[in-house]
Image: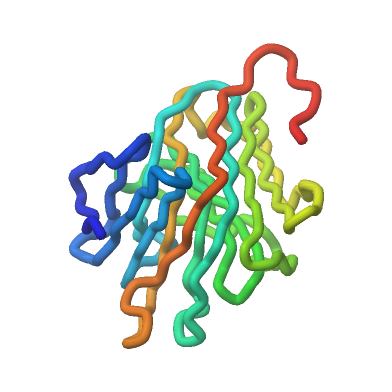
Amino acid sequence: LVPGSAASESYGPWTGRTFNTPKLGAQVYSPTDDAVTVYSAGLDLSGPTDGHHFVWQRTGGSFLIEAKVSQTVDPNSLSAKALLMARNSLATGSPCIAPARMATGQLGCKGRLTAGGSIADMMSPAWQYAPTNPCWMRLKRVGNTFTASYKNSGGTWTPFYTLVDTNNVFSPSMVVGLSVTSPTSSAAYPLQSATFSEIRVARLTGTLLTVK
């Protein structure tokens, strides 16, 4: 278990850091199955607070990131969230978009659409659908359109949120990755966690017809 910090730390193809230190965050990379388990405690994404543990790579242009998400569910910490995130930079307060699975078993999307602004729930109602645990999540950018989708085992991709960035908030080059946030914890689970496997990060070039 590798504690996160404001300084970046690299493991395998991923680099990790904790926002809102000194709260605790960490990641474990498994080269055997190319999976990343992300841990977090005492952190949340709400209002001006940019609190989460984030493991990331850089990409540019149109892209997609997807993963199988297996979330540890602590009945005392049902506000814990596993997220895919894209943000302009690693600076605190950077614009970002982050589809999420909450431990209650619902999907939502967090976002900050102005630098230094507040993080808000992008969907109304904020939390919808009922994916399985584990489920698969995807965030895809094509031009200025961001689409969040999910699927269950053996199912097909279902979009659940779309944002068209008409104000050009998001830069051509972005930091994308995997995140866990949890404002609460318990003695049984001092660190909330999610394991991300079957991870795919790809730049989309040329004429995109469909991504299945």
Could you tell whether 207 is left or right of 196 in the image?
A: right
- The N terminus - image quarter: bottom left
189, 41: nearer the viewer: 189
**Residue located at (60% from left, 56% from top):** 109
In the figure, 118 relative to 103: above or below? above
In the figure, 57 relative to 197: above or below? above
- Where is residue 143? Give x, y as percent: 64, 24
- The C terminus - image quarter: top right
In the figure, 195 relative to 161: above or below? below
Could you tell whether 161 is left or right of 202 in the image?
A: right
**Residue located at (47% from left, 62% from top):** 194
The number of numbered discs placed on residues in the rendered structure image is 0
Could you tell whether 186 is left or right of 34 in the image?
A: left
In the figure, 107 relative to 114: above or below? below
Can the viewer see residue 116 in this picture?
A: no
174, 40: nearer the viewer: 40
- What is the quadrant of residue 115 in the picture? top left
Q: Which colouring convention does the figure follow?
A: rainbow
